[in-house]
Image (cartoon, rainbow, N blue to C red):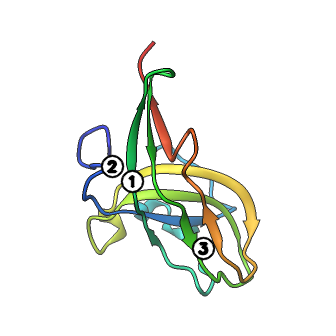
Amino acid sequence: MLGDARTSWDGSTDVRVLLLNSSHSFNPDHNFVSEVVAQEITVSGYARQVSASRTLTELDATDRVVANMATSSFGALVTGQTIGSAVVYRHVGATDSANPLIAFIDLVDTPTNGGTFAVDWNDTDGVFYVDSPS
């Protein structure tokens, strides 16, 4: 939804992150949280996280814009499921069918073990990037 200007990445838009289990398969036709929520992890201690410190950085050397945000930490996730991916979405309402997806991030399958699971977005590729046309 960034492309149609309904989401301001580095503005006041409420952007959140949820985790999906390892059985989820990416489908580019999914547009809303309601279409992926059946594979959301459900272990005790899990809660969706609000993103913080979002930035957009123009990189002239590589002709791209990188979207970054602070690390998303999910604490004390009880043993019992395997995390396979993260979804970044715009929170606009109380129902998942109103919340559009922004990005799907495939992760290394990681079993929950009672500890904190963190997704460190802040690297050279960020959460995602947009290249200029060639």
Residue 123, image x and y in percent?
58, 45
* Residue at left offset 41%, top offset 62%: 52
Residue 8, image x and y in percent?
27, 49
Name which residue type carries label 1: Arg
Of labels 2 and 1, earlier in sequence is: 2
* Residue at left offset 27%, top offset 58%: 13
> SS class of the residue under badge 2?
loop
Q: Nearer the viewer, mark 1 or mark 3?
A: 1
Name which residue type carries label 2: Trp
Look at the picture and state if 58 lies above or below 12. Answer: above
Picture quadrant of residue 92: bottom left
**How many angstroms separate mark 1 from mark 3 (CA)?**
24 Å
Residue 10, image x and y in percent?
31, 50
Task: Tell me whether circle 2 and circle 1 mark residues in contact (CB < 8 Å).
Answer: yes
Picture disc at residue 41: 3
Picture disc at residue 54: 1
Q: Residues within 10 Å of mark 1 (few under 14, many from 20)?
A: some
* Residue at left offset 41%, top offset 21%: 132
Picture quadrant of residue 53: bottom left
Q: Residues within 10 Å of mark 3 (few under 14, many from 20)?
A: many
Of labels 3 and 2, earlier in sequence is: 2
**How many angstroms separate mark 3 from mark 2 (CA)?**
25 Å
Name which residue type carries label 3: Ile
> SS class of the residue under badge 1?
loop
> SS class of the residue under badge 3?
loop
Q: Nearer the viewer, residue 101 or 121?
A: 121
Picture quadrant of residue 65: top left
Q: Residues within 10 Å of mark 2 (few under 14, many from 20)?
A: many
Picture disc at residue 9: 2
**In-image side of 115 versus 19 (left or right):** right
Picture disc at residue 31: none
